[in-house]
Every structure is written in C-alpha cells, then in structure tokens.
Image (spheres, rainbow, N blue to C red):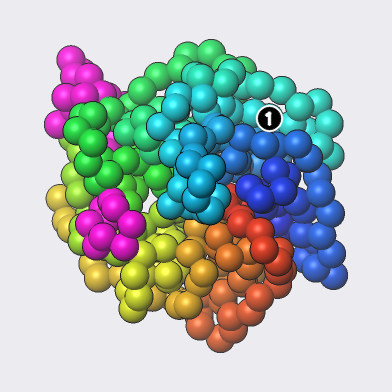
Amino acid sequence: MFQALLVLNTSRGSIDRIELADLSVRTLVGDVRSFPDGIVYDHVARRIYWTNMGIPDFDPALPVDDDNLDFSPKNGSLESAALDGTDRRRVLPVGALTTGKQLDADFAAGQLYWSDREGRRVSRVGIDGTGLTDLVVNPATGDEAEECVGIAVDPIANTLYWTQKGPAKGGRGRIFRANLALPQGQTPQTRTDIVVLWDQLPEPIDLWLDTDGGYLYWTDRGAEPAGNTLNRAPVPDRGEPGRAPEILARGFAEAIGLTVDPEARIAYVTSLGGLVRAVALDGSSDSVIAKFEGQSLTGIVGIR
C-alpha cells in the first residue's frame, strides 16, 4: 500500500510529499517554476520524473488564472530527481515539447510516455533522454478537441490510452485507444488503429489503468453533473465501445491528478482548488486528506 503521495503544486512551483501515516506535508523539490503537470515514480531506481507545461504567455491586465494562460509557446520540458529531491536532472530540455501533461512509464523498458496538449500529440522517450518519438500527432486545426491531456500505457497488452478533453465545459471530451507500436508503414499523423472508446464526455483529464482489475479510471473537470467527477469503466474488449462510466465521486474543484492504490482500494485525486481527496473504490468513504489553501495542484503519484 502507499506510504506517501507526491503532488505537483503549480502555484508554489514545488513537488510536495504527503505522509499518509500522519498527513504531514513537506516540500521535496522547490523552484519548479515551469508549471509541472504529470509525475511518475520508479520504485526500483527510487527516482521521480515529471513534465513541465512551460512558461505561458498571459495578459498582465487580466487575473492570472487558467483562462488567461496561453501555453502555446514551445517551452515545455521533462525532468527527474532522486526521491529525496536531490540529483535533479533534465531528461528533455526546455523546448523539446510544447505543453507536457500527464506522464506514464514502462520502467522495465526504460520508457516515459506523455501527452502534449498544445502540441496535440502523444510521445515517448527513454529515461536517459534518448529516442524521442511521437506516437500520435493530431492536425493543427486550432480545434481544442485535438489537444491531448491524459495518458495510460499497458506494455503487456501493447496498448496506449489517452484523453482529449476538448474546450472547457464543452462536452466534447474523448478517450482513445491505439497500439503502443505504430502500424508498419504508417506515421503518427496517418495511423489507422486509433479508436474512440468514449466520446461526448464533459472534459476528461487524467487516466489511471488497473490492468489486474480491468478498469480504466479518469478525472473530469467539466460541467456538472457528469463533470468535476472521478469516473471508472471496464476496459472494453477489442472492437467494443466503452460502457457508460460509473461516477465514484463528485464535487471536485476542477479535478485533475489521479492515482489509485489497488491494495488499499483508494483513489487519490487532486484539484486546481488545492485539495487532495481520498475516495474508497467501494464508495464507503470520501475525505479531504490535504488542503493547499489558495494553491493549484496537478499531478499525483503514490509511493510504496
């Protein structure tokens, strides 16, 4: 079971650690000022990896909030540090990606996978920074429905899942599936193995895949009643559409990050409202375990 949680704090520019035994909080990595978003942990190497959205443009005459931040400049990056916060390194330098969003990994193969929102793509790279490869590239039409946000990989089944949230509160969110490997002779722009599992979702964000239980979990920051929720649904068989999702919890202040402890049967969810909530998968409990007043949280990962 998880002993601690790491959360990305975009307001303070930090990676904070929450001890689940006493719910104490301390800063693990400071000076992360490039809007960190996705995070994973390699329990063998005891290293964390995270994406940065980069420094946005904004109108100084308007409030600095989510609606006034333009992340289209290509200045995202990918970083790593030891679990104690030391030995901080760049895996990919500033400008190697546009807007790094959720991050997943196949540490056995030494690969990191992420969605790039304004880059409208899904990519991977080796943990040493080599072999940067695009897996999905959507057209630059200006349609927010083409922007990729969440990601989950299943290396055993050779499967990739990702979300495209669509415009804010737009009800055009989708969850996709494709093979991890590009079909022979095809490109990230032209691959034909991509299928839509769910569509017309409020605004799906981060994913978490339970390969043992056969469920896909996701957060949604869209309009209520189906939005601002934690959801799950069985992973569809090949050729089958996704079933209607089950809503496990509601009322989040812009739900974003997600990690699930399968042994404890608890999902942990962060929000732009600065809360971390623990939701029992059987619906028996739902509680706030940490409050970051006036701050925004994005990615989250559990530490065993």
Up the image or down, 285 lies above or below 90; here it is below
Residue 184 makes an appearance in the image: yes
Quarter of the image for residue 203 reads bottom left
Find residue 111 and report its horizontal and vertical position in percent.
52, 27
Label 1, residues with CA under 10 Å away: few <14, some 14-19, many ≥20: many
Total numbered circles? 1
Residue at the extreme bottom: 284
Camera-side residue of 150 and 131: 150
| Residue at (85% x, 70% y) in the render | 22
Dominant secondary-structure state across the stretch colored magenta: loop
| Residue at (62% x, 72% y) in the render | 278
Camera-side residue of 19 and 155: 19
Find residue 77 and report its horizontal and vertical position in percent.
56, 26
Is 200 contained in the magenta span? Answer: no
Identify residue for label 1.
Answer: 80
Up the image or down, 34 lies above or below 258; here it is above
Q: Quadrant of the N terminus?
A: bottom right
Camera-side residue of 240 and 117: 117
- Classify mark 1: helix, strand or loop: strand
Find residue 186 and report its horizontal and vertical position in percent.
19, 19
Residue at the extreme front: 61
Is 184 contained in the magenta span? Answer: yes
Quarter of the image for residue 115 reads top left
* Magenta-colored span: 166-192
Specify whether 49 is left or right of 123.
right
Residue 176 makes an appearance in the image: no
| Residue at (76% x, 27% y) in the render | 88
| Residue at (64% x, 28% y) in the render | 79
User: Which residue type carries mark 1?
Assistant: Ser
